Image (tube, grey):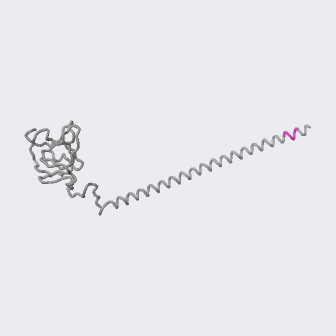
Amino acid sequence: MSDTITKIENLDDKLEAQDDILKELNLDKSEEKLESSQLMKNKKSSQILIALSIFAIMAGIGTGFGVHKLTANGQPVSTGPANSDLQQVAGEVVQAGDIFGIKDEDTFTDSAEGYLVIADIDDEGSHKLLRPGGDSQTVYLTSSSTDLDKFEGMEIKIKGETFKGQKAGWLMDVGQVEVLVVKGEEPSEF
């Protein structure tokens, strides 16, 4: 009987050894699976990165091609109402009769003449066009097409579009400026 007990103990030891070997094999397999899974994720990440890079390059090429097609003989296409041969901004030398801004006069519904000054900080608009008749005839101005600072102290004719002002009786977005008198005189009512 002791012989049988010894055999059983030996079998138990062998089973435990086999269990240990199986556990090690299972751990090795799960580590291999984990490594394999990580490799697959890395491959997928690399593939996504490559696809996004190719997309970005193609988008850049497409944008460049589109810009090329939108230019005529290397010159930008006008985004305004019409191609303009007028200067948008006055240079250093401004003379009576010079016209600046947008060429298409049909765009503008309103016009006014007067003496240009820079508006006060509390005024609506960046500039004021002083006109005979006093404060009630003053036109408050903004401009999206030319720099009005160049015309300060001049008598000018403006064309543009009138907007409802919050404080000003007359608020205009200036689209075109014609210089009438370079060294103008402020109306006597002011």
The residue that appears at 13% across and 48% down in the rendered structure is: 156
- Closer to the camera, 112 or 53? 112
User: Which quadrant, please, contains the N terminus?
Assistant: top right
Residue lying furthest left: 188
Give coordinates of residue 83: x percent, y percent: 24, 58
64 vs 36: above or below = below
The residue that appears at 23% across and 42% down in the rendered structure is: 164
Mostly what secondary structure, the magenta segment? helix
Give coordinates of residue 174: x percent, y percent: 20, 48
Magenta stretch in the rendered image: 5-9
Residue lying furthest right: 1
Q: Is residue 59 left or right of residue 48?
A: left
In this figure, what is the number of numbered marks?
0
Q: Is residue 187 magenta?
A: no
Q: Is residue 7 magenta?
A: yes
Residue lying furthest bottom: 73
Give coordinates of residue 102: x percent, y percent: 21, 54
The residue that appears at 67% across and 46% down in the rendered structure is: 30
Residue 76 quadrant: bottom left
- Closer to the camera, 87 or 187? 187
Residue 85 quadrant: bottom left
Q: In this view, does 80 lie to the left or right of 24?
A: left
Give coordinates of residue 40: x percent, y percent: 59, 51
User: Which quadrant, please, contains the C terminus?
Assistant: top left
